[in-house]
Amino acid sequence: MTQDTPPLRVAIIPVTPLQQNCTLVWCTATMKAAVVDPGGDLPRIHDAIAKAGVTVEKILLTHGHIDHAGMAKPLAEALGVPIEGPAEADRFWLARLDDDGRQWGLPGTPFEPDRWLVERDTVTIGDLSLDVYETPGHTVGHVIFHHPASRFALVGDTLFQGSIGRSDLPGGDHEQLVRSIVTKLWPLGSDTAFVPGHGAPSTFAHERASNPFVGDRVLASA
């Protein structure tokens, strides 16, 4: 590893017909990795792991919706690794993955993670340590992962490029979602780049300047 090699790398793997951003995150010093939000298309995820040449040591979940968590249990069993996250308030969603799978035409296996996460927990990936923040609003138990040294975050369905997560599903709350973004995401720094649960990556600076739901000017005039 050269001096210019970043400590963290990511590969985005769009999965399911909903084009959810499953993300492979790895530590360049150890080549240990985590799969974040494996909602489906396991062959595609396995191919990405092989292409990156990494060893997966855990699965991380931002929340319990079918397109993010539907294939977490089968993948964990195939790789022999634990599942960490989301917060326990999303137990409701993880318990009904099979029912939601039938509704959406996606495979889903109910489970409980090996570790529920709470505010200010940390999760490790190789030598990396990522901070956990609870960001309810899209779901009650939604969490995000932040690596301060890389100025990088995985925010699930809390925030998107040009939009925010939906809040009309059970446990959703629009005001709470906006509050999570403003009080949990923005303080992490405008120069933070993020991978959302769907769509293209962005930065907090870009969203604060232009997002029609949570941009600074929009909120100032609310």
Image (cartoon, helix red, strand yellow):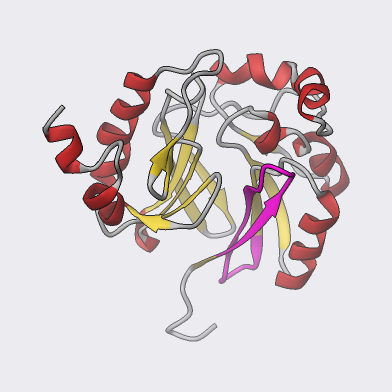
Q: Examine the structure image and report whether residue 152 is included in the region drawn in magenta.
A: no
Q: Position of residue 10 (x, y in %)?
A: 57, 63
Residue at position x 65%, y 68% in the image = 31
Q: Quadrant of residue 32?
A: bottom right
Q: Quadrant of residue 216?
A: top left
Residue at position x 80%, y 58% in the image = 44
Range drawn in magenta = 10-32
Closer-to-camera residue (59/70):
70
Q: In this image, 3 relative to 32: left or right?
A: left
Q: Which quarter of the figure is the C terminus placed in?
A: top left
Q: In this image, 97 relative to 222: left or right?
A: right
Residue at position x 56%, y 13% in the image = 170
Q: Is residue 102 above or below residue 195?
A: above
User: From this viewpoint, which residue is outermost toward the bottom?
Assistant: 2
Q: Is residue 133 above or below residue 203?
A: above
Q: Position of residue 212 (x, y in %)?
A: 29, 41
Q: Examine the structure image and report whether residue 14 is included in the region drawn in magenta.
A: yes
Residue at position x 83%, y 23% in the image = 102
Q: Quadrant of residue 149?
A: bottom left
Q: Which quarter of the figure is the N terminus placed in?
A: bottom right
Closer-to-camera residue (163/156):
163
